[in-house]
Amino acid sequence: MKIALIVISAVVVGLFVVVEIGLRSLFGFGNPLIYIGDEQIGYLLAPNQRTRRFGNRIEINEYSMRGSPIEKIPAPSGLRILLLGDSIANGGWWTDQTNTISSLIMCSLVSFTNNSNYHKVEVLNASANSWGPRNELAYLEKFGNFNAQAVVLLINTDDLFATPPTSLPVGRDRNYPDRKPPLALAEVWQRYILKQKPIPELQAVQNEPGDRVGINLEAIAKIQALTRHSNSQFLLVMTPLLREIGEPGPRDYEIKARQRLSDFTKAQQINYIDFLPSFNSTTNPQGLFHDHIHLNLQGNKFVSEVIERSLLKILNISKN
């Protein structure tokens, strides 16, 4: 009987170890990206992190950007672009480091630097899940634009209705952990099995009164002003939700908000790209999306190529 118990215990422990190792090596569980709270920005990805999730490499540098370490001041002969955004710019766990929009733009720009005055090209990626214009403004106010020649603000339709920055989800929402779990199995349990506890204080944030679209447009105007103050070019880009493509198209409140944004960019003389018409004109727009809002590699390539062309134009750079 004692021998049987020993054998059973050994088998259970062995299975536990195999499952734990498999979850870590194959899926990256046990080593999630962690977040830190910030009084102005709300939250940031904790600096200096590296992990792999579902085979995709993710690196966060010392400025909480998705990317490799950088120098605060760029090389005199370098071309530096700063991309600000949310999970679409960040790419999340489903996007390898090399396949983010910032990396795709940088790769393409690097390909012709030998024929230009630029000897180094950098596209910095300051982004985090569910950031809105006010988070991105706060990041810019805290860190500056890193002497970038151009700042690209990448938003989606939902960002026009984004709520104010808050650190409430950090350490309380399963998607914003503030520490590593003790085991990969513990992360799977917390993320996929254990019911998410509500955060009562978030309700007040999500029920922000007043003209939320107007408040976010004001934040975009402040980003533009900071960019101009540093003698940089500014490009605003908006991607649509999947359900906005085709018929019936955006909902009434989204149509009104989109029109306000269009009028705003004209009044502010902002270089603006709305991807809804472009996505509508593609033969298979669904093939550009990872889910209802985020883009897959094909979508990232589509967006990065258009952004790159616009950057070359506003920076007066020729590929020839």
Image (spheres, rainbow, N blue to C red):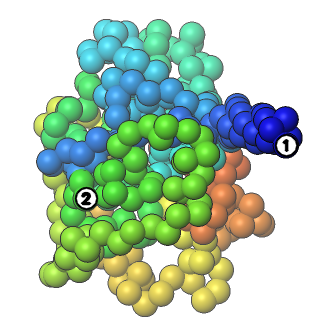
* Residue 308 percent location from the top left of the image: 52, 39
What number is the disc on residue 210? none
Look at 31% across and 9% down and name the residue there: 76
Look at 35% across and 29% down and name the residue there: 47
For label 2, the SS is loop
Tag 2: residue type?
A: Leu
Q: Which residue is mark 2?
A: 168
**Quarter of image, res 82:** top left
> Which of the pair 112/29 is nearer the observer?
29
* Residue 149 percent location from the top left of the image: 32, 29
Real-space Cα separation, disc 1 to disc 2, in angstroms: 53 Å
> Which of the pair 94/28 is nearer the observer?
28
> Which of the pair 36/13 is nearer the observer?
13
Residue 129, relative to residue 116: is it above or below?
A: below
Q: Is residue 229 left or right of residue 44?
A: left
* Residue 165 percent location from the top left of the image: 22, 58
Tag 1: residue type?
A: Met
* Mark in the foreground, 1 or 2: 1
* Residue 237 percent location from the top left of the image: 43, 54
> Which of the pair 101/274 is nearer the observer?
101
Q: Is residue 68 left or right of residue 203?
A: right
State the quadrant of the C terminus. top right
Q: Which residue is mark 1?
A: 1
Residue 69 visible to an observer of this rendering = yes
Q: Circle 1: is it few (<14), some (14-19), or many (20+) Cα within 10 Å?
A: few
Residue at the front extreme? 1
For label 1, the SS is loop
Residue 108, relative to residue 70: is it above or below?
A: below
**Quarter of image, res 84:** top left
* Disc on the earlier residue, 1 or 2: 1
Look at 26% across and 24% down and name the residue there: 147
Residue 79 visible to an observer of this rendering = no
